[in-house]
Image (cartoon, rainbow, N blue to C red):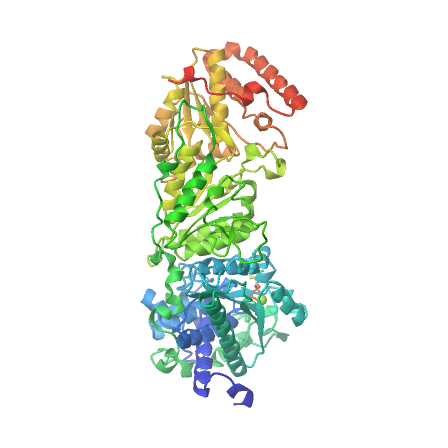
Amino acid sequence: MSEATTKGPLSPELLAKMDAYWRAANYLSVGQIYLKDNPLLERPLTLDDVKPRLLGHWGTTPGLNFLYVQWNRLIRERDLNMMYIIGPGHGGPGLVANTYLEGSYTEIYPHIEQNRDGIKRLFRQFSWPYGIPSHVAPETPGSIHEGGELGYSLLHAYGAAFDNPNLIVACVVGDGEAETGPLATSWHGNKFLNPATDGAVLPILHLNGYKIANPTILARIPHAELEELMRGYGYEPFTLEGDDPLVMHQQAAAVFDTMLDRIAEIQKNAREGGSTKRPAWPMLIMRTPKGWTGPKVVDGKPVEGTWRAHQVPLSEIFEKPEHLRQLDEWMRSYKPEELFDEKGKFREELADIAPKGRLRMGMNAHANGGLLLKPLNVPNFRDFAIEIEGRGQKDAESTRSLGQLLHAVMEANKEQKNFRVFGPDETASNRLGDVITGTGKAWMAETLPVDENLSETGRVMEVLSEHMCEGWLEGYLLTGRHGFFNCYEAFIHIIDSMVNQHAKWLKVTRQIPWRKPIASLNYLLSSLVWRQDHNGFSHQDPGFIDHLMNKKAELVRIYLPPDANTLLSVADHCLRSKNNINLIVAGKQPAPQWLPIDEAIAHCTIGLGEWKWASDENPEVVMACCGDVPTLETLAAVCLLKAKVPDLRIRVVNVVDLMALQPQSEHPHGLPDEEFDLLFPVGTPVVFAFHGYPWLIHRLTYRRHNHDNIHVRGYKEEGTTTTPFDMCVLNNIDRFQLALDAIMRVPRLAQTVDAAQQWYSEAIQRHKLYVAENGDDLPEVKDWRWPQDLTR
Ligand SMILES: Cc1ncc(C[n+]2csc(CCOP(=O)(O)OP(=O)(O)O)c2C)c(N)n1
Ligand SMILES: [Mg+2]
């Protein structure tokens, strides 16, 4: 052993064991990618031992394995509560290997025994039909982050660390991953992490130099520039560079010791010394070869240390005998006979250097958040209900009532510190400002006298990045806490892809018995398409509803409460629910209030229903509505119809829970067909005013008996900065249009259609002229109220 290798914190004995442990992890990783038999290489490798399809990623894996062994030592020596998050989740074989070596894998999956048969099964199941996925998937012990879609690792890490003061979240960021937008902004998590009350994040930039087919930007800028970048983000960068394993183990141990000391010092200063300064948290730049310890040259081309190591470095095993020989040589280079005994059990003296019990990263309870989930205390939402004196007579900002409820939730969970509200700078704009009062907004950066409500212990998280809000919240939920995300409706699309991934995670975890249910991901979308008075077309897009609709029915709930009391009832339900993705779409503008709280609760419980106070018996037409503005327009249309055709029998049906429209076979909230047919009688035309894109209603009601009679109005991508009512007119969801639609659909009124069309044209012309001239809506529209004599 050279001088350089012996110098450092590791004793020669521990150094040798850590290197052997690493070789074991690498061996098991390669074995998973390639082998279905001969797991200990007890005979020369033949084609019969090799999987027919070689699937997986080698390049990132040895680096991940190297880090895991280092972390194991830190956990043991310092008794750390540490969990891992792996950005390049395609390094799945490494995490499976490590959790196997530490024993957690076998505890969770007893058939993957600690012997030859177990290793064979471990190899065979990987990337095998009905086996396990290639990534750090929900099936992988200790994971909360699949890492398939790159970019969210550091966000999940910060989300996990908030309010977990004793937790250290080690987070590997791929140098390719670091090029993504979400990751690039995630470094700013350190402006929101309080060293006194939150845990620590230990970021490791895994600078293996390459992505799939290209070098990475951060590997090709001068090292000093990269360090400056990290300093600019507010970190204290450390560097580890090299490729000689023994030297690297020693140097890594030294650098990690320093970094952990730094973290301990930062936390001590904050917790005991009362420091409120934003610290420069340590981060590591680890520059090691991609595919480290793998084949150096294949078919005459360099592989180790290049992008060619990304997936399967020897990919033509069946075509080229040389590849099989190289694979045999590569696997034997890890000296399996030194690592496993004759029965195939990982040797005791090596296994012994891993942490034990709950300290093993594969067993960290935070990574199975449901285990730690404490129910959220939700105070009685009736306390915030709006008094209804006459239907629609009083205006209120619905989301303001929700803000009051959220504030009460904050207060009720102050002690257990397991609730946060997230939003991209819009919490006050969405009229949820009450939640900020007394709670404060998290902020560790500089504050000025002009600032309001910024606080080092704030629990409202505001940062102008939907990615950050979403990623933090996911990390927070996945580690067993509760949260609420509020966002402008149009811009929630920015995280479409992230919610996809979360939905996939939830779908899979539902099938994994040891994964306990976590709190639901709750969205409130406000600043809606219909009321973008300041902003216009760029801010008009209700399509997130459609996006979520594609997810598994068992996961998704979509609510469009028409007023404050229904919003309160829906929010109460969402805050208590588990393992779902709940979307609430509700306006923030002053709007008429319809339902007393008891009626609101009953209405939301079923999800849709006739508003009897606005309806007639034996309807000739059903006026259906979903969403606050469509509800208002529908009721105004009913009023117009009553004036024009006084004997027309109309039923008003309001839909809060969009999923109730689907048959029960499609969604657990689906209304039984018999009940649907009672509400929407076969043969009776339905004029349906919908908040979002109209075709969604057809999709949901496609199998319903009365589907052919459902005629939907909704947003059809017409918009600009105009008056609220003109937005409705532009999209043909206005009260005049809805009234005309009803007349056109009721057979007995066929004779009156021409006159009605004339009436409609005149009304719209009058409206257009008025708004063009006055810049505001017609008084008869703007000041319209539901006539009390129409209330049954
Ligand atoms: C958002 C996203 N875009 C593209 C990909 C396809 N992809 C998978 S791995 C990879 C390269 C990753 O490089 P890096 O983060 O450096 O990981 P490593 O080198 O450790 O494998 C790419 C582009 C992806 N998984 N996610
Ligand atoms: Mg890379």
125 shown above or below 294: above
678 shown above or below 556: above
Nearer-the-camera pick, 445 or 180: 445
**Lateral position of residue 666 relative to residue 234, left or right:** left
Nearer-the-camera pick, 96 or 735: 735
Do we see residue 467 in this rendering?
Answer: yes
Considering every residue shown, the one lying at the far top of the view is 751
Q: At 35% from the left edge and 43% from the top edge, which residue is drawn? A: 379
Measured from the top left, where is residue 213 in percent x and y?
A: 62, 64
493 shown above or below 334: above
Nearer-the-camera pick, 649 or 255: 255
**Lateral position of residue 667 relative to residue 262, left or right:** left
Measured from the top left, where is residue 698 in percent x and y?
A: 47, 32
609 shown above or below 180: above
Q: At 39% from the left edge and 19% from the top edge, which residue is drawn? A: 615
Do we see residue 46 in this rendering?
Answer: no
Q: Which corner quadrant of the image does residue 674 belong to?
A: top left
Figure label count: 0
Nearer-the-camera pick, 703 or 398: 398
Rendering quadrant holding ligand 1: bottom right
Measured from the top left, where is residue 630 in percent x and y?
A: 49, 28
Rendered-image quadrant of the C terminus: top left
Measured from the top left, where is residue 632 in percent x and y?
A: 48, 26
Considering every residue shown, the one lying at the far front of the view is 449
